[in-house]
Image (cartoon, helix red, strand yellow):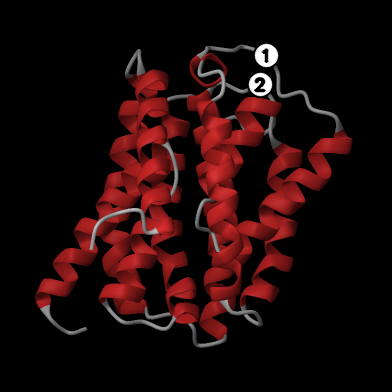
Amino acid sequence: MESNYYYIIAVAGGFLAGILNAIAGFGSVVTLSIMIEFLGMPANLANGTNRINMFSQTALSSFAYYKEGKLNFKRFKLAIILTFIGSIFGVYFALNISNADFKIIFKYILLLMFIVVLVNPKRWIKKSDLEFKMSNWLTIPLFLALGFYGGFIQMGMGLFTLIILVLLAKTNLIEANAIKVFIIALYSLMLIFIFSYRELVDWKIGLTFALGQGIGGYLAAHYASIYPKADVWVYRILIIVVLVVLIKTFGIYPN
């Protein structure tokens, strides 16, 4: 793990993950795969270490969206609070349950999410000036569950957040991405301290990934905010990313 080549791969992988997380999601698929399969880190250590680069990327992406006027804290206050609370319960299970058992269920959830994303593309790319309005009967359990999932494993968190904000809350995709990265940044900071306390963080590797992921996330968030057709391209990249992850997860490729 001390090879300079490994750290170059970590920076490059982090950069790609930052772009994906800022505009679509699934950046953790890249970082966790490199940590576990390439660097040989134990899954629980990789899960904790991954929170460093997640915080770096989402914090810088949040700043970029805020500068462009796309981040409205007041409008999504309840969603932010509920997700943070849910993440506390999620990290408890992350510290006590193996990731391997969850991954079996995750690949089938991923397949369902791919179908959802393909249905009615106009719902993803249309502009909307509607206020965030969703019944508390839906808001409370959904965002608590969302936080639980993020605290537990993080992988795929971006897509699940977008599905709730775009398809249910009728938020346009760019604004949904802005609040998504802020929510993740907020609870990731808390999780870093928890995983670190349990000695499940490799700071050297985490900070290396964070360098690339922070830059990639900031640049992607900045250009997504000012580019007129960003919603369309975000949707296209979202489809490609989910398809690639499905192929990898199900092993649908020649040996």
Mark linked to residue 170: 2
Which residue is outermost to the right?
137
Q: Say above or below: 23 vs 174.
A: below
The residue tagged 1 is 130
Whether the residues at callouts 1 and 2 have beta carbons within 8 Å, the answer is yes
Q: Nearer the viewer, residue 248 or 22?
A: 248
* Above or below 214: residue 71: above
Q: Is residue 71 left or right of residue 12?
A: right
Note whether 10 is above or below 92 in the view shown.
Answer: above
Dot 1 falls on a residue whose secondary structure is loop
As drawn, the residue found furthest toward the front would be 254
The image shows residue 12 at horizontal and vertical percentages of 20, 57
Looking at the rendered structure, the kind of residue marked 1 is: Leu
* Badge 1: residue crowd in 10 Å (few <14, some 14–19, many ≥20): few
> Residue 193's spot in the image, x, y percent?
55, 75
| Disc 2 secondary structure class | loop
Say how many tags the image has: 2
CA gap, disc 1 and disc 2 = 7 Å
**Is residue 64 visible to us here?**
no
The answer to whether one can see residue 139 in this image is: yes
Where is residue 209 shown, x and y percent of the image? Answer: 30, 64
Residue at x-position 35% and y-position 13%? 228
Q: Nearer the viewer, residue 22 or 252?
A: 252
Q: Residue at x 57, y 58 (%)?
A: 106
* Res 160 label: none
Quadrant location of the C terminus? bottom left
| Amino acid type of the residue tagged 2 in the rendering | Lys
